[in-house]
Image (cartoon, grey):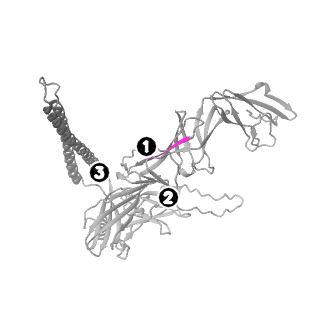
Amino acid sequence: MKTKTFILLLFLTVLSIGASAQGRMMPKLDKVTIFSKGAQVYRHKQVALQAGEQTLSFTGLSPYIDINSIQVKAGGNVTILGVSQRFVRPDSAMLTGQLRAAEAALKKAHNRLAEVKAKRTVMKSQLEMVKTNSSTAARTVATPLEAIKQLNQYYYDETMAINKRLIGLDEEEQQANHNVEKQQEVIDSLAGLNTKRLTVIDVKVDAPRASNANFTFVYYVNGASWYPTYELRSASTAAPLQLTYKANITQQTNEDWRNVPVTLSSANPNRSNVSPELKTYWLDYGLAAPTYDFGIDNNRISGTITDEEDNPVIGATIQVKGTTIGTVSDIDGHYTLTLPNGNRNVEASYIGMETQVKQATGNRLDFRMENSKLALEEVVVTGFASKDTKSNVKFTAPVIKADREVKAESIADENSMDVSSTAAKFGYEFEIGHPLTILSDNKPVSCQIGKYQLPTTYAYKGVPKIDKSAFLVADATGWNELNLIQGEATVFFDNSYVGKTILNPDQQSDTLHLAMGRDNGIHIERKLIKNNTSRRLLGSSKVQTMDWEISIRNARAEQVVISIYDQLPVSRNSSITVTPQELSGGQLDKLNGQVVWKLTLAPGEVKKLSLGYQVKYDKYHRLTIE
C-alpha cells in the first residue's frame, strides 16, 4: 500500500511540475495555418531565465492540441530537458479579480468618451456664439469700418482656435472609442474563460547563466476548419464567366485568434500518410481475391481507456503490438493512434493494471483495464529526458512548404483581400494579406480569396427522356492556375439567381464544365409516334418497332447551340437484337446505346428529331420495351 501511495504521489508530482520557478506565462500568438480539418498554431514567448535548472509553464493554450505535434525550441545556449502537457481550468478567484479590474477600466473608458463628447458640444455652442456676436446685421446703429475690421479679426481668431480644438477632439474621441472596444474584448475573453479547459505545457530547461531566451511553439490543434465556396456570374451567353473565390473559416479550439496572420491550406493532416501495399493475388478455385478495406479509415483509430469503475485512465500507454508505434491517453482517457499496414493488434498498458491486447476492426477501439495482481515494487517510473537532449524538442507536425508561386489574372474588387496563392507539396496554400480575427465560437468568418474572369463558351444540353428542360453549360478555360478546390457554387445568370451547383476541378481536362442551370427560353418535347409503333410475329420471334419524336424550339432572342442526348436499348442476350432505324443524323455509341445530336438553332427556330429502333426477341418470353 505504501508503495502504491508513493507511486501515486510521484505521478501527481510529475503532472504538477511547473509550479516552481516562474509563474504561468501565455505565449504570444504569431500566426495560424488552417487546414481543411485542424490548424497549426505558431507562438513565442521571451523569458527571463535564472541560472541552472528550472521549469517554465506556458498556459492559455487549446485543450485540443495533438500532443505528438508539439514543437518547442529555445534560443541561445539553453538546453531543453523535457516537455510535458497537462490540463487546467482558470482560477475562479483570479478571474473574478481580473474581470472586476477590466470592468473598472471599461467604465473609465466610457467616462472619458462621454467627457470628450461633452467638450465637443460646448465648443460647438461657443462657435455659434462667436458667429452671433460677430454679426452686424442685427445692430440698430451703423457700425464703423474700424469696428467691423476688429469684429472680422475676432471672428477669425476665435473660429480658428475652436476648430483646432475640435480637430484635436476628433483624435481623442477615436482613441477613447478604441479603448472602450479594447476593454470590452478583455471582458468578453475573461468571461469566456470560466467554462474553458486549457492546456499547460511545462518545459524543463537548463540555463548556463541568467539570460533572456526566446521560446517558440508550434503545434497542431483540432477544432478548426475552412471550406471554399464560389459565385459564378454571367450576364449572357456572349459574356465571359466571372468567378468569385471565397473561404469560410470556423474554429472552436478554446483559443481566440485576434488580429493574426492567417494561411489557408487545402492539405488534411488527419488523412493517413501510410502508403498502401499490395498483397499477393493467389488464384485458385473457391479462393476470393484479396481485400484491403478493414473498415478502418485512414489507418487511424481512437478510443478511451477506463478502469473497472469506468473512470478515465490518464497516461496509459497504447501501442501497436510488436512495434515502437505508440501514444498515451490524455486527461479524459482518450487516445488516437495511426496503424501500420498489416498490423491491427493494439496493446494497452498502465502501472498496476493488466496489459490488454485487442484487434482493431474499425476506427473505434476502447479498453477497460483491470487491476494487476503483480507486486507494484517492480514498477519503475521515468520522468524527464537527460541533460544530453538538444536545445529543441520536436514531434511530428504537418508542415507545408511552397514549391512554386502561381500568379492568376484577377479582377480588381474592393471586397478582395491581398491573397498570395501557392501550390505546395500536399495541396494549395492561400496567405491572407490582412490579419483576421477568428473567435472560438464556431461562427463562420468569410474572406474573399480572389475574383477572376474566365474565357468561356456556352452550350446547352438536353436529356428529354429524363427532363424536358434545357440546361446551360459553361465551358471555362484558364482555370488551372487559380488553385481551385472542390466546393459549392452559387450561380447567377442574366442578373438572376439560378441555384446551386458543384465546382469540381479534380479532372484531367483543361476545360471546366459548369452547370449554369435551366433555361426556360428553350422548349423540348419527346413523344411516342403511335402510328409508327408496331408489334408483329416472325416465326419463333416477336418484332417490335418504336418511333419517338423530339422537338426543340428556341424562344430566345439569340442563336443557341444545344446537344440533345437520348438512347437505344442495348442487348446483353444473344436472343435479343436491337436494330437502329431513323436517327436524324444522331451519333450512336454502340457500346452504351447513347445517341447525341449537336444542333444550332436560330431565334424562334424549331427542329424535330426522330429516334427509331427495332427489337427482335423470343416470342415465348416477355420483354419490356419503351
Categorize mark 2 by other alpha carbons within 10 Å: few (<14), some (14-19), many (20+). Answer: many
Q: Amino acid at mark 3?
A: Leu
Whether residue 309 is visible here, answered yes or no, is no
Q: Is residue 534 left or right of residue 604?
A: right
Q: Is residue 196 left or right of residue 409?
A: left
- Highlighted range, magenta: 241-248
Q: Which residue is mark 3?
A: 193
Residue 243 covered by magenta stretch? yes
Could you say where residue 503 lies in the image, as x and y percent from the top left? 55, 44
Residue 415, numbered label? 1
Q: Are marks 2 and 3 in contact (CB under 8 Å)?
A: no
Q: Quadrant of residue 562?
A: top right
Q: Amino acid at mark 2?
A: Arg
- Image quarter of the C terminus: top right
Q: Which residue is mark 2?
A: 300
Query: Please, what secondary structure does the residue beneath circle 2 have?
Result: strand
Q: Quadrant of residue 3?
A: bottom left
